[in-house]
Image: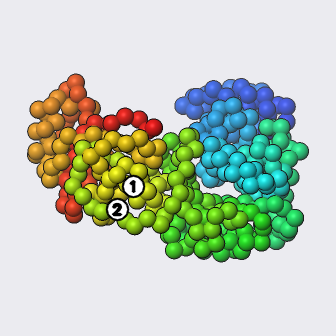
Amino acid sequence: MPNPSADAFTALLSDEGRALLDGLRDHDPSQELATATRLRREHPAELVSAALGQARLRQRAVAKFGAEDAFRMFFTPNGVEQATRATVAAHRAARLAALGVRSLADLCCGIGGDAIALARAGVSVLAVDRDPLTCEVARANAAALGLAELIEVRCADVTEVDTAGYDAVFVDPARRGGRGRIFDPEAYSPPLSWAVEAARRAPHAALKIAPGVPHEAIPEDAEAEWISDGGDVKEAVLWFGTEPGAHRATLLPSGATLTGGTLPDPRVRPVGRYLYEPDGAVIRAHLVAEVAREVEGGLIDETIAYVTSDRLAATRYATAYEITDVLPFNLKKLKALVRERGIGVAVIKKRGSAIEPEDLRKKLKLSGPHSCVIILTRVAGAPAMLLGQPAGARA
């Protein structure tokens, strides 16, 4: 979906444009042609096209911003794709506010999602982006949410902005190019090395990076935090002015935080009665050993991040399963087992297995009144299948 023109976006901010958008809140995209034909009888064609495009973007944005904000805000296609989920932005903003940050330079602000969270936390924000349309969208969002007094939007090259005098800087470099995601931190725009130097000049700083960043790329004077929301890893953040060298996993929406990174790797042991699947943020942060210590367990394989124990322990950092069967992987045997037990519903998980869960599901032809969890993995280096049941929700 292309960006609207500057004139078309300005028209969306008019009374006529806002009324159009309000009427499209529950718009059905499958009926778009009929809707467009009807609206063009009373409104300019370019405005109708811009409003329909914006309505689609708002519907997509609900997953990140919630309906209350998304249907008041404005978006670009890239803005929706790259914006931080509101729950994650609020967590980061709360950390900065707790550090005493009252003014912050938000470099590469995009449509203003992070600036909004910061302003709501009581932080005065200079929001900078080099794209004129993106800046107009950010201004519109600050105004739409009643935060214009706390958010100043400036269209500029972030590398030329003087951040002296601000309590903190936040940098969210562009990590997408014409060919998709960029994995080399030095290919970010601006490069990670520039962002790190900008961070070091401020009393406090947070740099948003991809969660798959190699640990060797993390500066020694930075704290690294991996954040998951609802079990999905969303981002990593490099913090400056906090705890140099610390690794942290934060799980939202609970806000549970695990720190560490100095424990030796857990021992490998036979599969016990319980299997623990650490949250993805815990795995990314290399904190599986901390979970193993908490549940008095060990690894099922030295290369697999599954922890096993003979006891069921309350932990906020892993999901527990009670294991009933531990078998070498054998499709014929698995089909026989699920048929004998009347398994009609199966949650299929994999780690360290080349088998795709959906392909396996088709082959199993599940049928029956019972359910189970099937885990495809390696145990002591050999392909294995574990069957069991959830052992209860996280504490």
Residue at (77, 42) in percent of width and height: 120
Residue 231 in the image, given as x and y percentages of width and height: 47, 45
Residue at (86, 44) in percent of width and height: 148
Lateral position of residue 14 relative to residue 23, left or right: right
Residue matched to label 1: 293
Q: Nearer the viewer, residue 383 or 364?
A: 383
* Residue 11 visible here: no
Residue matched to label 2: 266
Lateral position of residue 57 relative to residue 344, left or right: right
Which secondary structure lies at badge 2?
loop
Please report whichever mark, 1 or 2, sits nearer to the chain's N-terminal start: 2
Quarter occupied by the C terminus: top left
The image quarter in which residue 180 lies: bottom right
Residue at (73, 72) in percent of width and height: 200
The image quarter in which residue 266 lies: bottom left
Lateral position of residue 349 relative to residue 155, left or right: left
Residue 23 in the image, given as x and y percentages of width and height: 71, 25
Residue at (68, 45) in percent of width and height: 90
* Residue 253 visible here: yes
Could you tell me if the residues under marks 1 and 2 are in contact, i.e. CB atoms within 8 Å? yes
* Crowding at mark 1 (Cα within 10 Å: few <14, some 14-19, many 20+): few
Q: Nearer the viewer, residue 374 or 38?
A: 374
Residue 153 in the image, given as x and y percentages of width and height: 84, 54
Q: Amino acid at mark 1?
A: Arg
Relative vertical location of residue 33 with respect to residue 133 in this rendering, above or below = above
Q: How many marks?
A: 2
Lateral position of residue 218 relative to residue 296, left or right: right
Which mark, by number, is residue 362?
Answer: none
Q: CA distance from mark 1 to mark 2?
A: 8 Å
The image quarter in which residue 373 lies: top left
Which secondary structure lies at badge 1?
helix
Q: Amino acid at mark 2?
A: Pro
